[in-house]
Amino acid sequence: MIKSMTAFARAHHMDDAMEIAVEIRSYNSRYLDVALRIPHEYAALEDRVKKEAARFMTRGRLEIALSIQDTAESAGVYQVDHARARSFYTALKELKASLKMPGNIPFDLVANAPGLIHAQAPEKDLERSWQAVRPCLTSALADLEAMRLAEGRALRDDCLKHLQEIEGHLEAIEGRTTHSAVECRHRLEERISALIADKMAVDPARIAQEAALIAVKRDVTEEITRAKSHLFQFRQIMDSEAPAGKKLNFLLQEIHREFNTMSAKTEDAAVSHAVVEVKSALEKIREQMLNVE
């Protein structure tokens, strides 16, 4: 079943240790392109996130926003620069002595000095973090997959409608070509009769020979057979499990080429009109295929 490359999903997980939020948007692209936004301190998880995403999608652009908050970490872990504190306190004592100021130096004057006390970021436990992130990420990717499948079914239904239209035109073209040799002979007889104006006898055998040669040049039987085969393959590939976008786009080019050849070979206005309608239907399918993985 074909899948769309355009979808959206999000997931959230929270427990006593961590709070995880994942938001994923996917768009069409020729190749797999994963763009990840993740907190800097968890950047080491980037490769794991991208590998997990690649299990669900083989082509398209994935934009993943990953938020990670470790609620188990202590918010009050600070580090004191003792050497700077002693140096600062010594400088204050020297200033107090030089100014002959009475009293003691207040503790908060020392404690509030810039750069003496700063928050210390604890080292991240990446393995523990990944065990929390992965289920949430997988849940979001699974929801994205479900949305892509639903959109793919809608794309398939629309393509089937256009395929039926193309097959109807192809059947009409095939019906017209069965009488091409007879019509070619009649047209040739009419043209020759108009040119000679009954002044010369017309050799029926020669006319039949010339009409046969022209009919061979304008025969589109092979093109019709190949077009039928391509349309049959198109349906099969749409219903296969493998990613189908590239194969389907290639088949569309081949189908378009066969109908171009039919149009170039024929002088039948009805066939030419049918080919125009087929090309319009093929273009509608091609636009839909842009979103197929």
Image (spheres, helix red, strand yellow):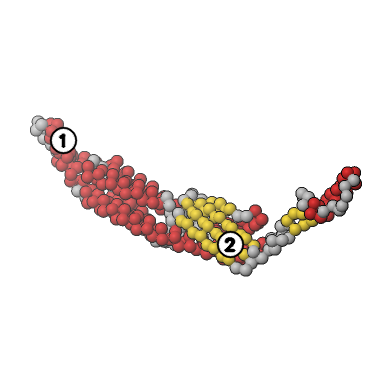
- Residue 164 left/right relative to 29: left
Q: Find residue 235 and report its horizontal and vertical position in percent.
A: 36, 58
Residue 86 visible in this rendered orientation of the protein: no
* Most foreground residue, 19 or 185: 19
Q: Is residue 20 above or below residue 217?
A: below
Tell whether label 2 touches label 1 (CB within 8 Å): no
What is the count of numbered marks?
2
Q: Secondary structure at mark 1?
A: helix
Residue projecting furthest to the left: 198
Residue with the mark numbered 1: 191
Q: Residue at x 84, y 52 (%)?
A: 105
Residue with the mark numbered 2: 20
Q: Secondary structure at mark 2?
A: strand
Q: Find residue 148 and report its horizontal and vertical position in percent.
A: 44, 59
Q: Is residue 180 above or below residue 82?
A: above
Residue projecting furthest to the front: 102
* Most foreground residue, 184 or 168: 168
Q: CA distance from mark 1 to mark 2?
A: 82 Å
Q: Residue at x 40, y 51 (%)?
A: 289
Q: Where's the N terminus, which quadrant?
A: bottom left
Which label sits on residue 73? none
Q: Residue at x 13, y 33 (%)?
A: 194
Q: Earlier in the sequence, mark 1 or mark 2?
A: 2
State which mark lies toward you, 1 or 2. 2
Q: Where's the C terminus, which quadrant?
A: bottom left
* Amino acid beneath label 1: Arg
**Crowding at label 1, few (<14), some or many (≥20) Cα neighbours within 10 Å?**
few
